[in-house]
Image (tube, rainbow, N blue to C red):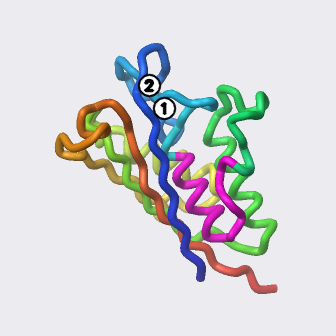
């Protein structure tokens, strides 16, 4: 068994769609980034890559590469999952916490989990997405950014 941890944070800006876990969430601002800035998918990708000792998302999908401009982060997550399998691991579970003052995310958590499970090719019951606030503290608490923590478990595939 291997465990990896991922983290991502993006500032909220005008003129961008807010996408988390592949879900377009109605909100006046979205996350700034080179891809679609889906911080949830990015944190899960880092957790998976870290568990397999494959580096981080920036090494595999650099923001200096035009191919990833406005990229769908669910597709990047699926590609990261393929790299995990190629290295000889199966994905056991994912647990993620999205930290945002606004918007409220409870109505979207199941769809986010379903999208992540589908991208990873694992049962939806093996993906947990939680939403918390930062109780007014720091940039996240002031509504200037959204942050995500994720943990992923892998198992070695034995032949």
- Front-most of residues 67 and 144: 144
Residue tagged 2: 30
- Asked whether, in this view, residue 10 is left or right of residue 77, the answer is left
Quadrant in the picture for residue 52? bottom right
- Whether pointer 1 and pointer 2 mark residues with C-beta atoms closer than 8 Å, the reply is yes
Q: Residue drawn 44% across and 62% down?
A: 95
- Secondary structure under the numbered disc 1 in the rendered image: strand
Q: Which residue is drawn at 56% across and 30% down?
A: 33
Q: Is the magenta stretch mostly helix, strand or loop?
A: helix
- The span shown in magenta is 41-58
The numbered mark, 1 or 2, whose residue comes first in the sequence reads 1
Are there few (<14), some (14-19), or many (20+) residues within 10 Å of tag 1?
A: many
Comparing 52 with 74, the one in front is 52
Looking at the image, residue 55 lies above or below residue 118: below
In 3D space, how far apart are the residues under numbered discs 1 and 2 (Cα atoms)?
7 Å
Give how far across and how far down residue 82 sits, in percent: 75, 58
Which residue in the rendered view is the most extreme toward the top?
15
* Image-quadrant location for residue 61: top right
Rendered image: mark on residue 129:
none
The one nearer the camera, 83 or 143, is 143
Which residue in the structure is indicated by mark 1? 19
Q: Assess disc 2: are there few (<14), some (14-19) or many (≥20) residues with their C-alpha within 10 Å of its C-alpha.
A: many
Q: Going by the image, does 144 lie left or right of 74? A: left
């Amino acid at each position: 068994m291997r465990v990896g941890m991922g983290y991502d944070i993006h500032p909220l800006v005008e003129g961008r769609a807010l996408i988390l876990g592949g879900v377009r969430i109605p909100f006046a601002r979205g996350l700034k980034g080179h891809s679609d800035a889906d911080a949830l998918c990015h944190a899960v990708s880092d957790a998976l890559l870290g568990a397999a000792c494959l580096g981080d998302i920036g090494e595999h999908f650099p923001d200096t590469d035009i191919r990833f401009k406005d990229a769908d982060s669910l597709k990047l997550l699926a590609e990261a999952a393929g790299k995990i399998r190629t290295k000889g691991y199966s994905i056991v579970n994912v647990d993620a916490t999205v930290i945002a003052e606004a918007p409220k995310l409870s109505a979207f958590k199941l769809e986010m989990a379903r999208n992540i499970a589908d991208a990873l090719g694992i049962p939806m019951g093996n993906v947990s997405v939680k939403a918390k606030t930062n109780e007014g503290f720091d940039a996240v608490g002031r509504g200037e950014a959204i942050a995500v923590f994720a943990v992923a478990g892998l198992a070695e595939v034995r032949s």
